């Protein structure tokens, strides 16, 4: 019985850790906008699609997170890059729609 508990706890920790950090990026684009301006454009669009979307300051930019109850969170990291910014999108799962990615793409120019 103790081995079963240890394995169960290990599996639970691995699942929680996997949800806490974004996986491999599914797309990356550059913009002439500053990270502040780009994030300010994307945030309201994402909040319309996913009302629980949050924005957090990270080194040299921002991380927008749209939580999902069924899949992993959708994450967009926007950091300073050359004369503008680089936006890197992390899709929650293959089940997720592309609406958030499309909203982020609308703000590139």
Image (tube, rainbow, N blue to C red):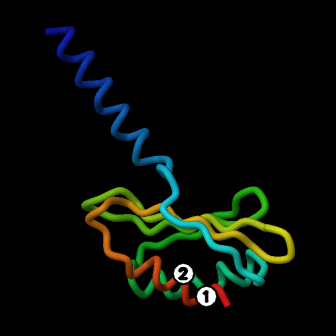
What secondary structure is marked by label 2? helix
Q: Which mark is residue 73?
A: none
Quadrant where the N terminus is found in the figure: top left
Q: How far apart are labels 1 and 2 at the CA level?
A: 6 Å
- Looking at the image, is 64 positioned above or below residue 37? above
Image: 55 above or below 102: above
In the displayed structure image, the side of residue 8 where residue 82 appears, left or right:
right
**Residue drawn at x 31%, y 68% as measured from the top left:** 96
Q: Which residue is mark 1?
A: 107
Residue assigned mark 2: 104
Please report the residue visible at 33 percent of the width from the left and 59 percent of the height from the top: 93
Neighbour tally class for label 2: few under 14, some 14-19, many 20 plus, Cα within 10 Å: many
> Is the residue 45 above or below the residue 57 in the image?
below
Residue 93 in the figure: left or right of residue 46: left
Q: Secondary structure at mark 1?
A: loop
Q: Position of residue 79 (x, y in %)?
A: 73, 65
Q: Using the image as rendered, state which of residue 69 and residue 85 is in the foreground.
A: 85
Q: Badge 1, how many Cα within 10 Å: few under 14, some, many 20+?
A: some
Residue 84 pos. (x, y %): 80, 77
> In the image, 25: left or right of 72?
right
Q: Residue at x 30, y 33 (%)?
A: 12
Determine whether, in the image, residue 6 is placed left or right of residue 20. Answer: left
Q: Quadrant of residue 109?
A: bottom right
Dots 1, 2 in contact, CB < 8 A: yes
Compare residues 9 and 93 and report the one nearer the observer.
93
Q: Nearer the viewer, residue 26 or 78?
A: 26
Outermost residue, right side = 83
């Amino acid at each position: 019985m103790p081995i079963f508990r240890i394995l169960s706890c290990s599996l639970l920790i691995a699942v929680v850790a996997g949800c806490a950090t974004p996986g491999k990026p599914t797309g990356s684009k550059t913009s002439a906008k500053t990270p502040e301006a780009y994030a300010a454009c994307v945030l309201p669009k994402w909040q319309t699609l996913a009302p629980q979307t949050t924005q957090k300051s990270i080194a040299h930019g921002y991380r927008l997170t749209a939580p999902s109850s069924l899949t992993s969170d959708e994450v967009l990291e926007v950091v300073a890059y050359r004369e503008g910014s680089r936006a890197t999108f992390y899709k929650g799962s293959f089940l997720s729609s592309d609406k958030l990615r499309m909203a982020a793409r609308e703000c590139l120019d």
